Image: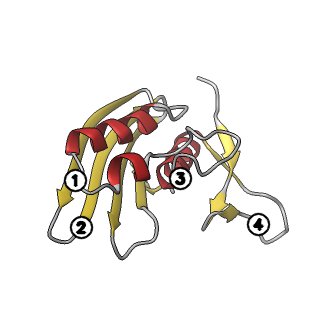
Amino acid sequence: MSTVWDFALEDGDLAISDDGQLETVEDLAAVGQRLGVRLKAWAGEWFLDTTFGVGYRESILVKAPNEQVIAAAFKKVILGTPGITKITSFQAEIERATRSLTVTFTAQTPYGAVTATAEQNELLPEMLVTILGPAGPLA
């Protein structure tokens, strides 16, 4: 199995060590970080690839959101993330009274499983994403 790596991100910016070097993440942490970036991105936001990210405007932040449409939008992004091989559990819950959405899933990678929770409500300007591996938070 080959190693996957990426530059480490810290609060959306490149992580730099105390000695001024760019930090990196590998394997499960790299896949988890990529997944987090994709889930936080809005489709159409990145001019180089307007399909990158979740279709929040088209599928989720609509007048009458449909759980099946929301699930399909998230699953497309999850399975389109390099390193994700399959989704082993998935749940999307809309709370209409509070206008909130919570998506929880577990996905398999060649390096182990990642479990994620993505939350959005009218008070959050962006999707709050928490990604966990077997040893704790990844992104």
Label 1 or label 2, whichever lies nearer to me, is: 1
Q: Which amino acid does label 1 sit on?
A: Ala
Q: In this view, does 126 lie above or below 1?
A: below
Mark 4 or mark 3: whose residue is earlier in sequence = 4
Mark 1 or mark 2: whose residue is earlier in sequence = 1
Distance from Cα at disc 4 to Cα at disc 2: 40 Å
Pointer 2 with pointer 3, Cβ within 8 A: no
Pointer 1 with pointer 4, Cβ within 8 A: no
Q: Which amino acid does label 3 sit on?
A: Ala
**Residue tagged by mark 2?**
99
Mark 2 or mark 3: whose residue is earlier in sequence = 3
Q: How many numbered marks are there? A: 4
Distance from Cα at disc 3 to Cα at disc 1: 22 Å
Q: Residue 17 carries which label?
A: 4
**Nearest to the observer: residue 61 or residue 126:** 61
**Residue tagged by mark 1?**
64
Helix, strand or loop for disc 2? loop
Q: Which amino acid does label 4 sit on?
A: Ser
Distance from Cα at disc 1 to Cα at disc 4: 46 Å
